[in-house]
């Protein structure tokens, strides 16, 4: 199923109106309210967006003005986003996990005149910094029960919009061109202060149209979305879903309910980040013997590949497949609701073994690649063209080539306009129309792109050895007990690793070994487990590329403590700064190897 037409919109500003005309009373959004799932039709979505957009016009918001959104992923985020587009303004998104200081950075840097806030918790962040925000004039509260006299509620803004003529909005929407600004998306800042990527309506219309040809989401399918809508990947998924007439079901704002939501909603498509697939993999395999798991994965891959080629499966292999189907595969599919046609993973690399496992179980997880600067996506594996370990082929209209130094260069209508108020960074990143990604990669003979490293993450040891830490890090995270692994060694004689334990798995280890929970990370038994995992990873690498020593940290990395981005990528520079003394101590210690594991 390719070549889906969608709405035929020219920009993101006219998308919702055209979707309402095309899909009418079909459900566009679904969310939980009072313990029950509630649907919002395309017509209802259009009416809400129209009234809010006219409300923004009534406030005096002009084309090109910036409007920020500070909220979890929820229907009101979508209302605010498309209302801003329709009014001709630009959305400057803010992650709901950002601190007051980080919110100040976005609001001040973008010059936002208005901000939508979710509730009193988010309002407090704005209140803490608004004295130093001269451009900010309006605060609109999503949860009206929390609004006070100093802010507007969504209903108040809608009421203001009802008093203005529809023709006024039509003129605004018509005035939005493909070259007009659509979004300021702030990079996660893994290597420095966030930069504002200026993305146009044309950028997102081009990438939405390209994705619409890939049979990723079909009309009338359900899509489950927990990713923050402040992030590029979630935004492009939302644009695609609403363009093709599918339905977005929003999460309950609780990471512990993601699997429960999947089971309940039974989506056909699930966009996510590697960490969630790693957790589901751990949940699915924790009680399965390692040898049986490896055998079931081999059998599943072999049978599904043979079926894909139209070949007859040998009887003995088919029998093994059917046994594994009843014992494992169906249970894994049910963790995703049982109706998943495909999932997609992005924002960070994922271990190939996890993709192989899910593929064997009948859960195709398609790895893709892109950046905020590419309007979210540049390449993706599809059900018709997949190569495990790669990030797929470039999307239609997108060109990818590899520079002389191995850097991935990208060109196409999806490439961003530049960094707002940072001409120097723009010139360094955009050269002769080609985006210099900062990532290293290769293209195989069939055009599939493989990521081999991040230029800025390359470790050069004291011996002059260039090492990409991403691969051993992802292999270590494959372990049941490990949450994060950061491999270090720049300018040092050898590699070491900082390890954090999975907070959801550590209690089980404590129970199994009669330990207090706060004893687990420093116990010799856990050190022995981690050493075994490191030994297994080291066996794949030359001596100079092996991890010689490690330390288990007492707490996992998190967004509030600054080590993780909102999409759960590790901020290497922050980790190195925060744990500098620990890293130095690892190098001073004579050995990490455990002999007789004891408490």
Image (cartoon, rainbow, N blue to C red):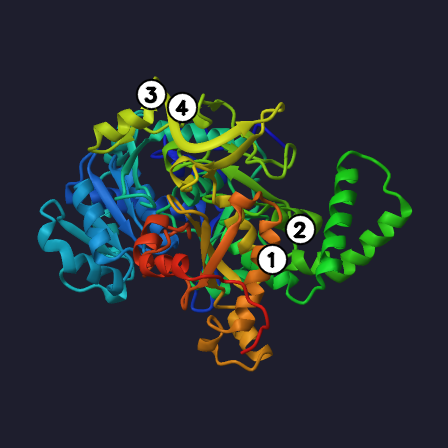
Q: Could you tell me if the residues under marks 3 and 1 are in contact, i.e. CB atoms within 8 Å?
A: no
Residue 413, labelled with which disc? 4
- Residue at 21% from the left image edge and 63% from the top image edge: 147
Relative vertical location of residue 181 with respect to residue 59 in this rendering, above or below: above
Q: Earlier in the sequence, mark 2 or mark 3?
A: 2
Question: Residue reaching furthest top?
Answer: 432
Q: CA distance from mark 4 to mark 1?
A: 36 Å
SS at circle 2: helix
User: Left or right: where does residue 271 sit relative to residue 172?
Assistant: right
SS at circle 1: helix
SS at circle 3: strand
Residue 552 x/y as whole percent: 45, 64
Q: Earlier in the sequence, mark 3 or mark 1?
A: 1
Q: CA distance from mark 2 to mark 1?
A: 8 Å
- Residue at 44% from the left image edge and 76% from the top image edge: 518
Q: CA distance from mark 4 to mark 2?
A: 35 Å
Q: Could you tell me if the residues under marks 2 and 1 are in contact, i.e. CB atoms within 8 Å?
A: yes
Front tag of 4 and 1 = 1
Q: Earlier in the sequence, mark 4 or mark 1?
A: 1
| The one of 123 and 283 positioned closer to us in this rendering | 283
Q: CA distance from mark 4 to mark 3?
A: 15 Å
Residue 431, labelled with which disc? 3
Front tag of 4 and 3 = 3
Residue 171 x/y as whole percent: 25, 30
Residue 281, labelled with which disc? 1
| The one of 131 and 154 positioned closer to us in this rendering | 131
Residue 357, labelled with which disc? 2
Quarter that holds the N terminus: top right
Q: Earlier in the sequence, mark 4 or mark 3?
A: 4
**Label 2 environment density (alpha carbons within 10 Å; few <14, some 14–19, many ≥20):** many
């Amino acid at each position: 199923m390719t070549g889906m037409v969608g709405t035929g919109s020219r920009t993101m500003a006219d998308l919702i109106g055209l979707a309402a005309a095309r899909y009418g009373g079909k459900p566009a959004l679904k969310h939980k309210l009072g313990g029950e799932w509630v649907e919002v039709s395309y017509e209802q979505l259009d009416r809400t967006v129209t009234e809010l957009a006219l409300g923004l016009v009534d406030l005096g918001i002009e084309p090109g003005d910036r409007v920020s959104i500070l909220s979890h992923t929820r229907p009101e985020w979508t209302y605010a986003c498309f209302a801003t587009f329709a009014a001709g303004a630009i959305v400057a998104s803010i992650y709901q996990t950002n601190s007051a200081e980080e919110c100040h950075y976005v609001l001040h840097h973008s010059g936002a005149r208005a901000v939508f806030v979710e509730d009193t918790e988010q309002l407090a962040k704005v209140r803490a910094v608004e004295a130093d925000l001269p451009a900010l004039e309006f605060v609109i509260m999503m949860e009206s029960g929390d609004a006070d006299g100093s802010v507007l509620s969504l209903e108040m803004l809608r009421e203001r919009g009802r008093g203005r003529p529809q023709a006024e909005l039509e003129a605004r929407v018509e005035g939005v061109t493909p070259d007009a600004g659509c979004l300021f998306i702030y990079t996660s800042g893994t290597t420095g202060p966030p930069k504002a990527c200026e993305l146009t309506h044309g950028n997102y219309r081009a990438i939405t149209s390209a994705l619409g040809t890939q049979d990723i989401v079909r009309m009338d399918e359900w899509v489950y979305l927990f990713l923050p809508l402040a992030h590029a990947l979630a935004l492009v998924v939302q644009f695609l879903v609403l363009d093709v007439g599918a339905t977005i079901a929003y999460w309950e704002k609780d990471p512990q309910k993601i699997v429960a939501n999947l089971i309940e909603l039974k989506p056909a498509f699930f966009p996510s980040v590697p960490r969630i697939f790693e957790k589901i993999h751990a949940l699915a395999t924790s009680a399965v013997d390692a040898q049986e798991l490896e055998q079931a994965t081999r059998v599943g891959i072999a049978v599904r590949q043979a079926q894909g080629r139209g070949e007859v499966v040998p009887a003995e292999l088919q029998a093994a497949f059917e046994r594994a189907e009843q014992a494992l595969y169906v249970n894994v599919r049910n963790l995703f609701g049982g109706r998943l046609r495909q999932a997609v993973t992005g924002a960070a690399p994922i271990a190939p073994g996890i993709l192989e496992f899910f593929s064997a179980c009948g859960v195709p997880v398609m790895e893709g690649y892109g950046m905020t600067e590419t309007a979210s996506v540049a390449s993706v594996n599809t059900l018709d063209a997949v190569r495990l370990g790669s990030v797929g082929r470039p999307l239609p209209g997108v060109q990818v080539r590899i520079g002389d130094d191995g850097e991935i260069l990208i060109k196409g209508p999806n490439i961003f306009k530049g960094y707002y108020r940072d001409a120097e960074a723009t010139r360094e990143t955009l050269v002769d129309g080609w985006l210099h990604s900062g990532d290293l990669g290769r293209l195989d003979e069939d055009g599939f792109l493989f990521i081999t490293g991040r230029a800025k993450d390359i470790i050069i040891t004291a011996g002059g050895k260039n090492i990409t830490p991403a691969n051993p890090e992802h292999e270590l995270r494959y372990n049941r007990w490990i949450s994060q692994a950061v491999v270090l060694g720049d300018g040092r004689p050898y590699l070491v690793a900082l390890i954090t334990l999975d907070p959801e798995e550590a209690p089980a280890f404590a129970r199994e070994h009669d330990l207090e929970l706060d004893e687990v990370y420093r116990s010799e038994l856990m050190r022995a487990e981690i050493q075994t995992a490191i030994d297994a990873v080291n066996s794949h690498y030359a001596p100079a590329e092996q991890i010689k020593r490690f330390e288990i940290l007492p707490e996992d990395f998190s967004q509030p403590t600054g080590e993780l981005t909102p999409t759960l990528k590790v901020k290497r520079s922050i980790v190195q700064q925060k744990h500098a003394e620990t890293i130095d101590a690892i190098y001073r210690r004579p050995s990490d190897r455990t002999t007789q594991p004891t408490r």
